[in-house]
Image (cartoon, rainbow, N blue to C red):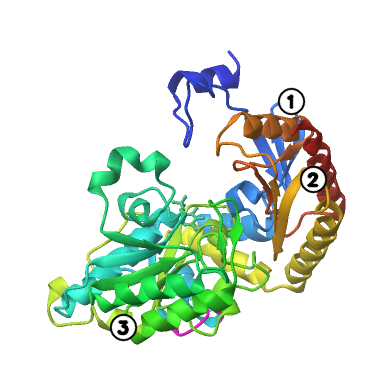
């Protein structure tokens, strides 16, 4: 029996309707920007395996350090113990995080990082005896699939069965030039209720909303309004963090900095699942008390796994290297050149570029997981390019180490795919 047939027997894949999409392609190895299937056909990983493997797959500068750590300390409980990789990672991160982040809380994935941020905000006010139990989130947001993260996410077609169990969330439109006055008015009236604990947002790019990009200046206005009402601001940088927008963190495009930042995805360079919820001293102090119950009683078994921490340290070292920084500038320049070339194509409605992110909207309307999306996906794969179009949006978010020839191939295959539309 083939691997694909054996897969069908026992495996249940994420985000999949198995009746209409029964087949899963076996991938057996990966190197740099390439994935290889069992027949050794290669595919350019145009989305860095969901924005994780940004330094390329199996990069020896990362794997060698993780292998060395594996023989020294594999795993240890993080309540009551600490260890060198966690301490070193915290020091490195505090050095590069925007604003005045001072404390780092570990969990396992982007969704848990968001759940932790939400619980921190709610308990922060609970500890102060302030009745603030509502959260503001942006329309079309995506913050993850656990209950808290799902509650603040806006893409709700798939959340129908859970709706009555979600947290109390007030939603506002993404602030833009055309709506900023009405968004501010609504935001102000929510703040005036005095019941808002936190405002959560994906800074500048809403990844799951098909790489929707918006300007920093209007978001910044909301952040300073929230700040003046004592509302905690939570930047979900799970996707945008670690160089993808051209700056180390998307929050750096603004002056007003968040109280809490969520990180995951490329944090560990694609080696292991791990996430961080980082916060200011003021947030931490809301839990610092003689009374034990005022502490934050949230914890995951694999918190601060030493191997994941080691991968994260190696990733940050690479991100700060000239080679990777040059790669980010090069990819951004190449994307802009491709954008100038493709924007006038009759099938293309609009294009956008930020850092290493390129997105193109087709004129045709289609469902998020509809037939055209499948057709494009299969065309890309046949041509050795892995991209996951979302509805009528085709986007690229390649590893920083992708070569110019590999980028050329992605651009060329995208251009040819427009014939199918
Ligand atoms: C992917 C993502 C999440 C969820 O992360 P998981 O690791 O998939 O749970 C949350 N927020 C944003 C912005 C994301 O892109």
Residue carrying label 2: 410
Quadrant including the N terminus: top right
Magenta residues, start to end: 96-101
- Closer to the eye: label 2 or 1: 2
Left or right, residue 269 beside residue 115? right
- Residue 128 located left or right of residue 371: left
Mark 1 beta carbon near ligand 1 (under 8 Å): no
Label 1 environment density (alpha carbons within 10 Å; few <14, some 14–19, many ≥20)? few
Secondary structure beneath label 3: loop
Residue 163 visible in the current orientation:
yes
SS class, disc 1: loop
Task: Name the residue at 52% across, 19% down.
Answer: 6
**Which labelled disc corresponds to residue 230?**
3
Q: Residue at left 55%, top 17%? A: 5
Q: Nearer the viewer, mark 1 or mark 3?
A: 3
Residue 379, position as x, y percentages in the image? 74, 31
Q: Is residue 372 above or below residue 406?
A: above
Q: Nearer the viewer, residue 416 or 268?
A: 416
Pick the residue in front: 81 or 27: 27
**Residue 78 visible in the current orientation:** no
Sequence-wise first label, 3 or 2: 3
Cα–Cα span, label 1 and label 3: 57 Å
Pointer 1 or 3: first along the chain: 1
Q: Which residue is mark 1?
A: 39
Q: Give me the C-alpha separation between circle 3 and circle 2.
A: 46 Å
Picture quadrant of residue 337: bottom right
């Amino acid at each position: 029996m083939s691997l694909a047939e054996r897969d069908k027997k026992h495996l249940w894949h994420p985000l999949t309707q198995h009746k209409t999409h029964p087949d899963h392609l076996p991938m057996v190895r990966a190197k740099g920007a390439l994935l290889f299937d069992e027949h050794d056909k290669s595919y350019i990983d145009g989305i860095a395996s969901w924005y994780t493997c940004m330094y390329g797959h199996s990069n020896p500068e990362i794997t060698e350090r993780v292998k060395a750590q594996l023989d020294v300390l594999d795993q240890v409980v993080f309540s009551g113990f600490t260890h060198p990789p966690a301490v070193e990672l915290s020091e490195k991160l505090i050095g590069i995080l925007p604003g005045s982040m001072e404390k780092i809380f570990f969990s396992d994935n982007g969704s848990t990082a968001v759940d932790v941020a939400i619980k921190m905000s709610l308990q922060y006010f609970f500890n102060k005896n302030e009745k603030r139990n509502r959260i503001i989130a942006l329309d079309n947001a995506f913050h993850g699939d656990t209950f808290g993260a799902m509650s603040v996410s806006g893409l709700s077609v798939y959340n129908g069965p859970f709706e009555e169990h979600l947290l109390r969330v007030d939603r506002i439109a993404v602030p833009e030039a055309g709506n900023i006055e009405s968004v501010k008015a609504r935001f102000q009236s929510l703040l005036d209720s005095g019941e808002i604990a936190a405002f959560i947002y994906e800074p500048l790019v809403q990844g799951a909303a098909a790489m929707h990009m918006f300007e920093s200046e209007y978001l910044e206005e909301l952040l300073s309004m929230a700040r003046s009402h004592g509302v905690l601001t939570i930047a979900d940088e799970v996707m945008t963090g670690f160089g993808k927008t051209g700056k180390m963190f998307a929050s750096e495009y603004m002056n007003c900095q968040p109280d809490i930042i969520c990180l995951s995805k490329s944090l560990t360079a694609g080696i292991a699942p791990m996430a961080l919820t980082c916060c200011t001293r003021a947030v931490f102090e809301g839990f610092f008390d003689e009374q034990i119950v005022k502490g934050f009683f949230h914890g995951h078994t694999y918190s601060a796994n030493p191997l994941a921490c080691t991968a994260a340290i190696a990733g940050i070292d690479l991100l700060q290297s000239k080679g990777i920084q040059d790669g980010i500038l090069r990819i951004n320049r190449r994307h802009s050149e491709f954008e100038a070339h493709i924007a006038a194509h009759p099938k293309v409605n609009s294009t956008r570029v930020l850092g290493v992110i390129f997105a193109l909207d087709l004129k045709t309307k289609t469902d998020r997981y509809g037939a055209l999306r499948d057709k494009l996906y299969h065309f890309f794969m046949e041509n050795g390019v892995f991209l996951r179009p979302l509805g009528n949006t085709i986007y690229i978010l390649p590893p920083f180490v992708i070569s110019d020839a590999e980028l050329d191939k992605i651009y060329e295959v995208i251009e040819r795919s427009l014939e199918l539309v």
